[in-house]
């Protein structure tokens, strides 16, 4: 079934899904919009963009979007949990001397003229563990 919908390039995917919900009675959380074999996401964790727009996907005038319904079942990731999992698993800074996990903005201690025990002690200090 073909439906036409007017939108602007600066309109967010979230508002586009809301328009579809109003006209088609399909809940926004159940909608999957597909363009060019890619699902249109409302946000992108990897590049930390809160709300993606129609223009971000380079959707031109007279383009065709495919609307499918999301299948129920499985585990649905909460937005904040997904961001937290990404930060925990991907965004890591590890001390090159003792391999301790450090906050992203920490700097590792210089090793010139230090013994390994001094390095481990300084890495364990609050200065390098975000305290």
Image (tube, rainbow, N blue to C red):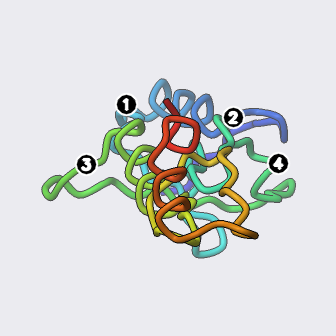
- Pointer 1 residue: 25
Cα distance between the residues tagged 3 and 1: 21 Å
Indicate which label's residue lies in the foreground, 1 or 4: 4
- Pointer 4 residue: 55
Task: Decide: few, some or many residues near mark 2? Use Cα within 10 Å; few <14, some 14-19, many ≥20.
Answer: many
Q: Is residue 9 left or right of residue 91?
A: right
Cα distance between the residues tagged 1 and 4: 25 Å
Q: Are marks 2 and 4 in contact (CB under 8 Å)?
A: no
- Rendered view: 110 above or below 3: below
- Residue 69 position, x and y percent, is 33, 54
Indicate which label's residue lies in the foreground, 3 or 1: 3
Q: Measuring 58% from the left and 71% from the top, which residue is drawn there?
A: 96
Q: Measuring 82% from the left and 48% from the top, which residue is drawn there?
A: 55
- Pointer 2 residue: 12
Q: Which mark is residue 76?
A: 3
Q: Are marks 3 and 4 in contact (CB under 8 Å)?
A: no
- Residue 89 position, x and y percent, is 42, 62
Helix, strand or loop at label 1? It is loop
Cα distance between the residues tagged 3 and 2: 22 Å
Q: Is residue 47 left or right of residue 61?
A: left
Indicate which label's residue lies in the foreground, 3 or 2: 3
Pick whichever of labels 3 and 4 is earlier in the sequence.
Answer: 4
Q: Is residue 86 left or right of residue 103?
A: left
The foreground one among 3 and 97 is 97
């Amino acid at each position: 079934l073909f439906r036409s919908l007017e939108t602007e390039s600066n309109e967010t995917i979230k508002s586009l899904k809301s328009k579809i919900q109003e006209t088609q009675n399909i809940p926004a959380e159940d909608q999957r919009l597909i363009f060019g074999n890619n699902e249109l996401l409302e946000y992108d964790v990897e590049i930390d963009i809160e709300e993606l727009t129609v223009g971000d996907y380079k959707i031109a005038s007279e383009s065709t979007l495919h609307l499918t319904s999301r299948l129920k079942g499985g585990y649905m990731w909460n937005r904040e949990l997904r961001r937290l999992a990404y930060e925990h698993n991907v965004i890591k800074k590890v001390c090159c001397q003792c391999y301790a996990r450090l906050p992203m903005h920490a700097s590792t201690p210089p090793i010139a003229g230090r013994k390994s025990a001094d390095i481990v002690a300084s890495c364990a200090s609050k200065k390098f563990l975000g305290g």
